[in-house]
Image (spheres, rainbow, N blue to C red):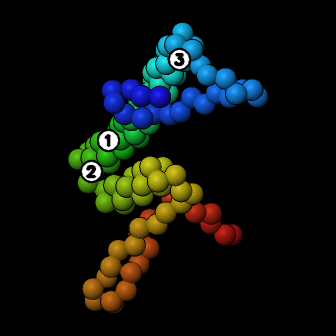
Amino acid sequence: MLLDDEVVGVLLLWRSEVARFDDQSCALLTTFAAQAAIAVRQVQLVSQLENRSAELARRVAELEALNEVGDAVSSSLQLDEVLATVVATAVELSGTEGGSLFEYDENLRLFALRTAYGVRHRA
């Protein structure tokens, strides 16, 4: 099956008895093969379009989340609130269950938990 000089598949027919295909049968099979090639290409194009649409939707969601974080940063001087928004958004975007943000304390030379999202607290 050819489409624009590119092989997109094969139409295979057989019969139990050996017999030559006449010109009319060959023309008909060529037409069927061309139609099948077009159908295969259309399915490929639709699949590519669906994949691109899904990627675009994912990127839009990421941009909306980044915008949300940007709004939180610009609208609040409360660092804890901003960091909590950053972690919550990162968790939601990544499809994970939780996340934590640690701040490095140079004097103590250690990381201290600053905020967490999706973490169960033990009583």
Q: Residue at x 52, y 52 (%)?
A: 95
Decide if residue 53 is on the left or right side of residue 104.
Answer: right
Between circles 3 and 2, the one closer to the viewer is 3
Front residue (pair 29, 64)? 29
Front residue (pair 103, 75)? 103
User: How far, Cα to Cα, is label 1 from label 2?
Assistant: 15 Å
Name above or below for residue 109 compared with residue 7. Answer: below
Between circles 3 and 1, the one closer to the viewer is 3
**Residue 99 visible (yes or no):** yes
Q: Position of residue 9 (x, y in %)?
A: 50, 34
* Label 2 Cα neighbours within 10 Å, binned few <14 / some 14-19 / many ≥20: some
User: Which of pointers 3 and 1 lies earlier in the amino acid sequence?
Assistant: 3
The single residue placed furthest to the bottom in the displayed view is 108
The residue labelled by disc 1 is 63
Q: Which mark is residue 52?
A: none
The residue labelled by disc 2 is 73
* Label 1 Cα neighbours within 10 Å, binned few <14 / some 14-19 / many ≥20: few
Residue 56 lies in what quarter of the image?
Answer: top left
**Residue 53 visible (yes or no):** no
User: How far, Cα to Cα, is label 3 from label 1?
Assistant: 55 Å
Q: Residue at x 62, y 66 (%)?
A: 121
Between circles 1 and 2, the one closer to the viewer is 1
Q: Secondary structure at mark 2?
A: helix
Decide if residue 24 is on the left or right side of residue 60.
Answer: right
Q: Secondary structure at mark 3?
A: helix
Disc 2 marks which amino acid? Val
User: Which of pointers 1 and 2 lies earlier in the amino acid sequence?
Assistant: 1
Name above or below for residue 90 compared with residue 70. Answer: below
The residue labelled by disc 3 is 26
